[in-house]
Image (spheres, helix red, strand yellow):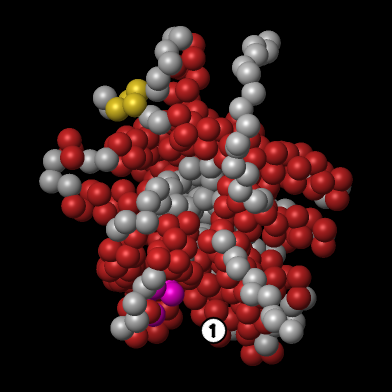
Amino acid sequence: MKHRVIRLSPPQLLVVTFLFFIIVGMGLLKLPFATTESITWLDALFTTTSAMTVTGLAVVDTGGSFTLFGEVVIMSLIQIGGLGIMSFAVLIFMMLGKKIGFKERLLLQQALNQTSVGGVIKLVKYLFIFSFLVEGFAVLLLASEWVPEFGWRRGLYVSIFHSISAFNNAGFSLWPDSLMGYVGSPIVNITISFLFIVGGIGFTVLVDLWKSKTIRKLSLHTKIMVVGTIVINIFAFMMIFILEYNNPNTLAQLPFLDKLFASYFQAVTPRTAGFNSLDYGSMERSTLLLTILLMFIGAGSASTGGGIKLTTFVVISLSVFAFLKEKREIRIFRRTIDQNYIFKALAVSMISVLLVFTALFFLDMTEKNASFLAILFEVVSAFGTVGLSMGITGSLTAIGKWIIIIVMFVGKLGPLTLAFSLSRPDKEKIHYPKEDILTG
């Protein structure tokens, strides 16, 4: 009797591998010496999923509920999830001197969200070199703040943990109030925000900026990401500063310089970072709605962040403007965007909206003690793998935790990756005549 070999497509293998690491992490966190007090299997699964998907939502206090071993497990999952499972697999292959085949390259292309197989191995090399250099440099900067406060041993460890968490846009912190105790610290604010902005802009953009000698030689993707990131961050900073300026629970009680730092930090952290230096539960509703939009948009493709991606948002926005101006092509920076990318952007956005709506619908039935806005905030935060919360994560019901786990998982892998892993390619052999329909 012949055994049937199960062949998995790159999206399917990516999903299975992610699930494997989440389950292994759950088992490690359930070990007696991983926690200071017993936690449930569901809480362990929630924590490992949040770490592996670099989200940062926590049902238990990371610094208080886990031992050093448990925190190292979480930190390791963050690094693996942020830089990519397949990237680490390629690194091991290269260290062992083994040849990397076409199938592995396809997996990397899928994991890093690249348009072609060519150059993915070189991209991985740049990825690790750059990541470890940036994280190491950030540890030194953060240590200058935390070593004098906690001593050498604790100060260095706290710096390492938050450096890895920030660069991978995870948002896990060893303090229950995240970074609220350092709202006015220039070193913490600038270093942490630099880490998650660099990690969230995308590795292809970083490599392109590294290799290109002039602005003209930059790719269209890089130009959109850099300009888009600057514009959206400045806009968010100005809006939060204005909206929260007189709020006695956030900015009103702070000195002017601290107001600027806090506004800046809360403006850039929704781009899937997850750290906060102000209490989101005390913010104005208008600020929360703006934050929800920023979390849904997310970071850049091939980055450590989530969301529908900034490029997707830009493509859809340009499509709307092109339609209103009755243009047949979408042009930006003297380039035309291919129609296939428009279809992809629409598919990603539509699936994402449906996912958020479905999760919101069921959570509104299960979480009776939470407000609608708090639930919406939680769902979008989970989808965008952000990790910000209005304070309802720890009080979620068992069903609510399962829903958020699924949303985090789909948000990290990407709606299209999961859709492709469940669907079979259908090659169109028959073409039908066109006919007009009424829209709008």
**Residue at (45% x, 39% y) in the render:** 310
Residue 67 placement (x, y as % from top left): 59, 83
Quadrant (top left, top right, bottom left, bottom right) of the C terminus? top right
Q: Nearer the viewer, residue 414 or 252?
A: 414
The magenta region covers: 88-92
Q: Is residue 68 above or below residue 280?
A: below
**Label tally:** 1
Q: Is residue 5 above or below residue 126?
A: below
Quarter of the picture containing the N terminus is: bottom right
Q: Main secondary structure of the magenta part?
A: helix
Quadrant of the rendered image containing residue 172: bottom right
On the rendered structure, is 193 left or right of 51? left
Q: In the image, what residue occupies the spot 68% across and 10% down?
A: 438
Is residue 44 inside the magenta stretch?
Answer: no
Q: Nearer the viewer, residue 423 or 208?
A: 423
Q: Classify 373 as above or below 86.
A: above
Give above or below for 326 relative to 234: above
Task: Please say whether residue 216 is visible from this viewpoint.
Answer: yes
- Secondary structure beneath dot 1 equals helix
Q: Position of residue 87 (x, y in %)?
A: 41, 68
- Of all residues, the one furthest to the bottom in this rendering is 33
Q: Position of residue 377 (x, y in %)?
A: 66, 43
Judge left or right: residue 206 versus residue 211: right
**Place of residue 10 in the rendered image (x, y in percent of width and height, measured from the top left):** 53, 61
Q: Which residue is mark 1?
A: 68
What residue appears at the point 48 percent right and 31 percent down from the top-left corner? 342
Residue type at mark 1: give it. Leu
